[in-house]
Amino acid sequence: MEDNKKYYLKESVYAEPLINNWYAWSYLLSPITYSLYLKNTHRRLLNSFLNNAELHILANTNKAMSGGGEFVNCTREDYNAIKAHYDRLAEEYGDLIEVADDIKKLDQMLLAHQSGESLEPLYGDIPPSLKGFVELLMDRQHRPDYRIIESLVYSSPLYKESIQSMCFGINEGDKERAFVFSTPRINYTQRLKINQPFNSQFWDKLFRLRTSPLLGSEVKVLFSGVDTEGLLSFESLFTEYEPAQPNPKQIKSARITYVGHAGLLIESKQSNVLIDPMIGVPNELNRDDMISYSQLPEKIDYVLLTHNHSDHVHFETLLQLRSRIGKVVVPKNNGGGLLDPSLKLMLSRIGFDVVEVDDLEEIVIPDGKILSIPFLGEHGDLNIRSKAGWFIEINDKKIYAGADSSNLSPEMFMYVKKLIGELDVLAIGMECVGAPFTWAYGALFTDKVHKQVKESRRLNGTDSAQALDMVDTFKPKQALVYALGYESYYGYMMGMDYSDDSKQIVESKRFLEQCKEKNVTAKLLTEKYTLDLI
């Protein structure tokens, strides 16, 4: 790297946010839920690898097995490092493991209280690590429960910025990243780990280099004194070549750009909105198939998040865009339930300007409005409120983005129709066969969940019949099917391996045919796509 030349961050560089060497997602940032994933998922997986490494190594030669989240993708040579990491989690984070143990004790204490009488005498029996952080309460059937006072927890030693970092690598050829939810990042022979908390301004300065170069001398100053690990040099992350540029075509009224998975960029001449961004990292094989960071607007007015799943609240993308984002808009949670941590609290903690909205709450933008729409389904019947579909009206064009929501109550959408009218574009996911709810939430349950319950309560989205009912209700001019995790470059976290007879693909194609019969233009989004609304 020469001091007097200008350098950009390479398009092919990926940056994985980590919490204690595991890929960061929202339930790991919130301390109470993290304690349960630390004990019930991370240490369990590591222990399984240590007891039967050969099974894990064999399973990771089968894509269908490796994407299920139960096998650590490490080699025999990593065994000692895995053992050291397993031991360190117990030695250095005993306070978090104590919280996980005490959650189980609190659950058992409340399950034993069946009389329906006052819970006030039980405050003295709350397990030690949770005292001061929970309120005991009763539901309408006189069953005891509790809520977590999350803001206090974030202000306590349980929230540890010191375990936050990012791991950098270069996406080359057809080499895939190991599945992030089952494999800690412990081998840095071809990676660079930078130990900085997520709210550090260092990240904003670094990721601005996606679009705005610095002199080599300035890059060296940026990295001066920064705590790093790994054999990949920071200089190897940079290039003199300019990245790809945004679409130069002038916007007439409104434009929708599919940016991958559940991501939609909606633009006019005056404003823009980005929904559920999860930006892929290109290489020479797929560069033309995707939108890269440099092709997004330099200023993003609003980022809208539909629900608190890792492929919709994608920290890897959000942290890289933070300096370009005006406000992040999130649905309101249920007020302290263990299963539903506050998106507003966690995103504010790591440096975002966050607006929290309730159902049907409106935000006015220069040439229209944003409206949160009730979101049903896809959460295994759990009491989780952090979910919303988004209605955007921009220059009189009406767009609904429903992501993974399910049309379980057509009557609800009939009421919504009276409020918003007919649509120009309906975008809906077709993840009609989701994983059992325990795939995402199992670590948060302190008692065994029976197989029949798991199989019954799946993270299902809309199927073709439900989507067609929405077409009949909203009479859109165009329909978009998206959010399937279809793109191969998301394999590191989606773990999907669709075939032509996968139900999600069959249902998507059926919906496209049904739309055609109704003279509604419909498209399945699987690669870069732009739709101009005139």
Image (spheres, rainbow, N blue to C red):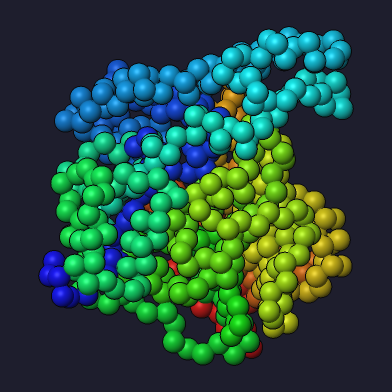
Q: Residue 139, how many percent across, how many down?
A: 82, 27
Asked where in the image residue 282 lies, by quadrant, the reply is bottom left
Q: Quadrant of the C terminus?
A: bottom right
Image-quadrant location for residue 244:
bottom left
- Rendering coords of residue 178 (x, y %): 31, 44
Image height check: is 146 above or below 366?
A: above
Q: Nearer the viewer, residue 130 or 14?
A: 130
Residue at the (64%, 54%) spot, across then down? 330
**Residue situated furthest left in the rendering:** 2
Q: Is residue 267 above or below residue 137?
A: below
In the foreground, 121 or 141: 121
Does residue 142 show up? yes
Residue 457 higher or lower than 91, as above or below: below
Q: Position of residue 191 (x, y in %)?
A: 22, 48
For image coordinates 35% across by 32% down, the residue present is 71
Quarter of the image for the N terminus: give it. bottom left
In which quadrant of the rendered view does residue 418 lie? Answer: bottom right
Residue 426 vs residue 472: left or right? left
Q: How many marks?
A: 0
Res. 495 visible in picture: no
Q: Is residue 488 above or below residue 345?
A: below
Q: In this image, 422 relative to 133: left or right?
A: right
Q: Residue at x 86, y 23 (%)?
A: 141
How far from the left and from the top, in percent, is residue 23?
39, 42
